[in-house]
Image (spheres, rainbow, N blue to C red):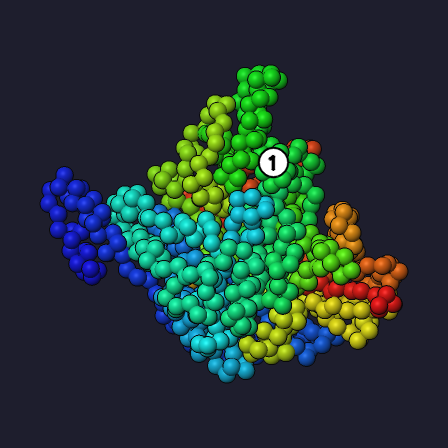
């Protein structure tokens, strides 16, 4: 049915009663037929002016020269984690009832990267479970078009990489592997997989389920003027249901083009990528995010055997718009026994688990908090919370966000992710060893990077701390009425009841805690590379060398080298042997302060209406003044040499703090470690360059007021819904930073 026919049927109605019935029936009969297929959009931006790129290169050369840093390579900034409304969650965030802006296709991401954020490279990473064969073809075509207008392939303005996200969620620590982005080097047919590989599980099953009647019939009726968006969502899901699932016992290269292919574990994902044989990297992310990661999860199992492919899995995302995944703490949100039974840990200094908070909410509701009856109810609340998994908040009826205070928050971590899972932190992962082969223990060798994980087709949103509702993933219902539809279980009805309930597994965990997650959405980070050229090959080679680093959003310049390896001076990301005390040099320069608005080049590159729509009036617009670097923090990690070594004792954070003069021209520091050559083990070193304090969106998370003992006594969440004013960016002070990739050091004297 054509759009014109849909509109005619919708409006050819009679009197009031007849009209209501007719509209309802119209929606029921024509929701799918009226839904429009959404494609990748149209790229409108031409190549960025050459003088813009040249000015940036010259500015970087001047800063490098002042610090006597090598200029053989350029530092290029990109975003390797970008979603559009080809991702089902991004589509839902874009709906009018969620205060969304409508369709955000792949073309928007290309134009945004080129003219709003002014990146050097980016990748598309829509969730593979919603990438039907047709959408995958649209994605490939759009990414090729984005590159086609970039100019000389050896010196392009922007490089766009093709990729997807493998989005796995397990219900227990033993079955959870988490999310991984797949990045492809090439673009041409025959050099990229014919289909992305999705994760078999909750998300893929949900998209293949029948469209709920409420979504198909009721919601378009309730928001009738915006009905087309809901019709389109129904069409989107029906397209997923219609695409056949590939056979599981056939070599991936022999499968038909028109099926969707899944992999249940990392082992299967790596096997399928190896069967294709194309150049591809796999980047784990969100490793501490509690919105879907079961309490008590750790990364131990992912180091065993074929669970890890060291040739493909070379980088890890330590920071994104969903928070920090760098730092390790000893606390746990649950203690598991045989992966079946969980107990709720008592609070520790600086941390309270959410299962414990569930018990404290019930305690406050008891008539006699010291009675045996109340204690039994408290224990039931803790137990039910843990058994409900990521839906735990619903196990205590009648609560509001404020009741949960800052449970699950790593209070002394930098911009932590919600419900922090330290067993997935980059520091924990770096300290791990697998002793399946006792003679040659296996370890992760990750380079550290950061990205945005933006779901609004906006790569590199961290260039300015403004427009929280558009530059972050914070979203929510536009009114109290729609709030009751979107979020389950009567959250607006606080109660004194001591009732505790089990939670139906059908309710999606992301739906439950997305409301709380809005307080933890940042603008996002960047992935930086030291590349021999601006070309696709130059950037990819830096990925493979692990000569990469991450920033929390600002374009901080960072060099980290070991000066006296047996092969001479080598950069971050290297594995190196030394025959004396290792000596290191760090150079760092703060990011440029930003001017308001957009530069002339952006205004000339995009039509005025599109520039305003994409950039919201704010682009990357550097002044000539830089933020100062205040200090360099050195982290030293000694990976396990015995299986029972305590992880916390192996992580020294910070091991050294090197003060900087606060000069805007940058900071240079050197240090050495005389202990390493005398130790019979490998050492790992990385650095953080800390920038002077500025204001950042959601840096206060749930904005707790603390008592003299450091306990949260009152929370003021920063909602994504109408409950927080659209103009409130929820700013708080923060020290932005850059994380180098580690240098992995062993002693030549032990060889």
Which residue is at 46% across, 77% downward? 190
* Residue 321 in view: no
Q: Position of residue 608 (x, y in %)?
A: 38, 68
Tell whether 488 sits left or right of 231.
Answer: right
Which residue is at 34% across, 38% downward? 481
Quadrant of residue 506 in the image? top left
Q: Position of residue 736 (x, y in %)?
A: 63, 56
Quadrant of residue 329 in the image? top right
Tell whether 278 sits left or right of 235.
Answer: right
Front residue of this view, candidates 691 and 124:
124
**Is 378 situated above or below 580?**
above
- Pointer 1: what residue? 342
Which residue is at 25% across, 48% downward? 224
Front residue of this view, candidates 708 and 179:
179
Q: Residue furthest left?
A: 14
Front residue of this view, candidates 410 and 425:
425
* Residue 285 in view: yes
Q: Position of residue 259 (x, y in %)?
A: 38, 63
């Amino acid at each position: 049915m054509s759009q014109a026919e849909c509109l005619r049927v919708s409006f050819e109605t009679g009197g009031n009663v007849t009209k209501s019935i007719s509209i309802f029936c119209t929606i029921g009969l024509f929701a799918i037929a009226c839904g429009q297929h959404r494609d990748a959009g149209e790229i409108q931006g031409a190549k960025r002016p050459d003088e813009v790129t040249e000015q940036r290169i010259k500015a970087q050369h001047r800063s490098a020269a002042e610090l006597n840093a090598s200029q053989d390579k350029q530092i290029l900034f990109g975003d390797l984690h970008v979603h559009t409304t080809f991702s089902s969650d991004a589509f839902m965030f874009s709906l009018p009832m969620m205060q969304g802006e409508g369709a955000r296709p792949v073309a928007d991401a290309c134009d945004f990267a080129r003219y709003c954020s002014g990146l050097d490279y980016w990748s598309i990473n829509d969730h593979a479970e919603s990438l039907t064969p047709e959408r995958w073809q649209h994605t490939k075509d759009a990414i090729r078009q984005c590159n086609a207008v970039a100019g000389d392939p050896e010196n392009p303005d922007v490089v766009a990489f093709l990729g997807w996200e493998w989005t796995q969620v397990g219900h227990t620590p033993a079955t959870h592997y988490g999310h991984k982005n797949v990045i492809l080097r090439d673009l041409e047919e025959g050099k990229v997989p014919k289909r992305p590989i999705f994760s078999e599980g909750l998300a893929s099953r949900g998209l293949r389920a029948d469209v709920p009647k409420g979504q198909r019939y009721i919601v378009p009726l309730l928001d009738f003027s915006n009905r087309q968006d809901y019709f389109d969502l129904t069409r989107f899901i029906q397209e997923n249901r219609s695409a056949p699932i590939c056979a599981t016992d056939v070599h991936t290269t022999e499968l038909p083009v028109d099926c969707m292919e899944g992999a249940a574990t990392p082992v299967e994902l790596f096997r399928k990528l190896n069967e294709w044989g194309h150049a591809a990297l796999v980047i784990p992310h969100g490793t501490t995010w509690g919105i879907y990661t079961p309490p008590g999860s750790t990364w131990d199992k992912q180091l065993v055997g074929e669970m890890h492919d060291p040739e493909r899995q070379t980088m890890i995302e330590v920071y994104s718009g969903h928070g920090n995944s760098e730092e390790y703490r000893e606390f746990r949100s649950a203690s598991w026994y045989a992966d079946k039974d969980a107990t709720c840990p008592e609070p520790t200094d600086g941390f309270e688990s959410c299962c414990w908070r569930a018990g404290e909410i019930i305690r406050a509701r008891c008539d006699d908090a010291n009675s045996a009856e109340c204690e039994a109810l408290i224990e039931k609340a803790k137990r039910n919370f843990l058994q409900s998994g990521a839906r735990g908040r619903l196990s205590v009826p009648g609560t509001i966000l404020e009741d949960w205070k800052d449970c699950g928050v790593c209070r002394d971590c930098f911009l932590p992710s919600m419900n922090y899972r330290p067993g997935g932190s980059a520091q924990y992962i770096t300290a791990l060893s697998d002793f399946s082969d006792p003679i040659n223990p296996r370890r992760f060798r990750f380079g550290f990077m950061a990205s945005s994980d933006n779901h609004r087709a906006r790569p590199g949103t961290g260039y300015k701390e403004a427009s929280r509702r558009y530059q972050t993933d914070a979203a929510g219902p536009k009114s109290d009425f729609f709030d009751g539809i979107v979020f389950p279980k009567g959250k607006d009805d606080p109660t004194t009841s001591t009732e505790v309930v089990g939670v139906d597994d059908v309710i999606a965990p992301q739906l439950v805690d997305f409301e709380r997650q809005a307080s933890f959405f940042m603008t996002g980070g960047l992935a930086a590379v030291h590349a021999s050229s601006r070309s696709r090959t130059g950037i990819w080679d830096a990925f493979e060398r692990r000569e990469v680093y991450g920033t929390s959003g600002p374009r901080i310049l960072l060099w980290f080298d070991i000066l006296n390896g047996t092969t001479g001076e080598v950069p971050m990301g290297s594995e190196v042997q030394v025959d004396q005390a290792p000596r290191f040099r760090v150079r760092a320069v703060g990011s440029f302060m930003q001017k308001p608005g957009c530069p002339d080049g952006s205004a000339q590159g995009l039509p005025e209406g599109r520039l305003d729509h994409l950039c919201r009036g704010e682009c990357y617009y550097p002044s000539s003044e830089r933020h100062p670097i205040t200090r360099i923090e050195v982290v030293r990690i000694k990976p396990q040499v015995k299986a029972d070594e305590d992880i916390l004792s192996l992580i020294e954070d910070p091991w050294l703090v090197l003060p900087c003069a606060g000069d805007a021209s940058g900071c240079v520091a050197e240090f050495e470690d005389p202990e390493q050559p005398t130790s019979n083990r490998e050492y790992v070193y990385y650095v953080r360059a800390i920038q002077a304090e500025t204001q950042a969106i959601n840096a206060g998370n749930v904005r707790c007021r603390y008592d003299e003992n450091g306990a949260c006594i009152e929370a003021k969440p920063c909602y994504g819904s109408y409950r927080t004013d659209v103009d409130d960016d929820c700013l708080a002070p923060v020290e932005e930073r850059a994380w180098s990739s580690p240098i992995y050091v062993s002693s030549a004297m032990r060889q």
